[in-house]
Amino acid sequence: MTLLQFKYTLSAQNNPDNGYITLGGNKVHQIYNEREFYKALGYTEGVSVLGVLPEEFVWDEYRKDNGNKSHLCLQAKIIEFLLNNSLLFAIHFSERFGQCVGSCSDFPRHQKLNCTYCLLHPNQKEDSPY
C-alpha cells in the first residue's frame, strides 16, 4: 500500500497552491490558520522562542538526512491534521486512509516512544476505527 503523498505550500505567495494542502496537484484543503497547521506538525512555542522558523523546523525534523523523523512521519501529521480539520477529507479519503493505518515500514523509528501513537505505527492497525 502506497501512502498518500500530500504537499503543502505556505511560503510562495505567487503560487496558486499557496495556502493549500495538495494531493497529486489537486487542492485538498485550504489552510486558514498557518499557526495551527505548524502546531499540528509539532512546531511549538518553545521552538519558536529559540528563533527557529516553522519551515526550518519542518526541514530539521522531517526532511533533512538523519532528521528526528521521516517523510512518512510528516505525511502522518498532515493526515491527522486533515482528519481533524477537513470533513471533505474524512468523507472522500477515509477508505484509502484506512488501508494506510499501521503501514509504516520504518522499523528503527518504531522503537522511539514518540512514534507509539502515530497513525501509521503498526500497533495502530489493531485499534483503528477505519
Image (tube, rainbow, N blue to C red):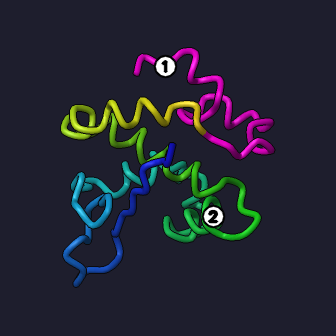
x and y, in percent, of residue 31 in the image:
26, 55
Residue type (three-letter) at the residue carrying disc 2: Leu
Q: Nearer the viewer, residue 99 or 16?
A: 99
Magenta segment includes 116: yes
Q: Which residue, as the protein is rendered here, is positioned at the far bottom?
A: 14
Give the left or right position of residue 8, taking residue 14 as reference: right
In the rendered image, the quadrant that contains the C terminus is top left
Q: Nearer the viewer, residue 51 or 120?
A: 120
Give the left or right position of residue 100, taking residue 33 as reference: right
Magenta segment includes 50: no
Q: Measuring 48% from the left and 45% from the top, which residue is drawn there?
A: 77
Q: Residues within 10 Å of mark 2 (few under 14, many from 20)?
A: few
x and y, in percent, of residue 54 in the image:
49, 65
Q: Which residue, as the protein is rendered here, is positioned at the far front?
A: 1
**23 w.r.t. 91: above or below:** below
* Nearer to us: label 1 or label 2: 1
**111 w.r.t. 60: above or below:** above
State the SS at label 1. Answer: loop
Mark carried by residue 128: 1
Q: Measuring 32% from the left and 32% from the top, which residue is drawn there?
A: 94
Mark carried by residue 50: 2
**92 w.r.t. 56: above or below:** above
Q: Measuring 58% from the left and 64% from the top, which residue is drawn there?
A: 57
Q: Measuring 58% from the left and 16% from the top, which residue is drawn there?
A: 126
Quadrant of residue 51 in the image?
bottom right
State the SS at label 2. Answer: loop
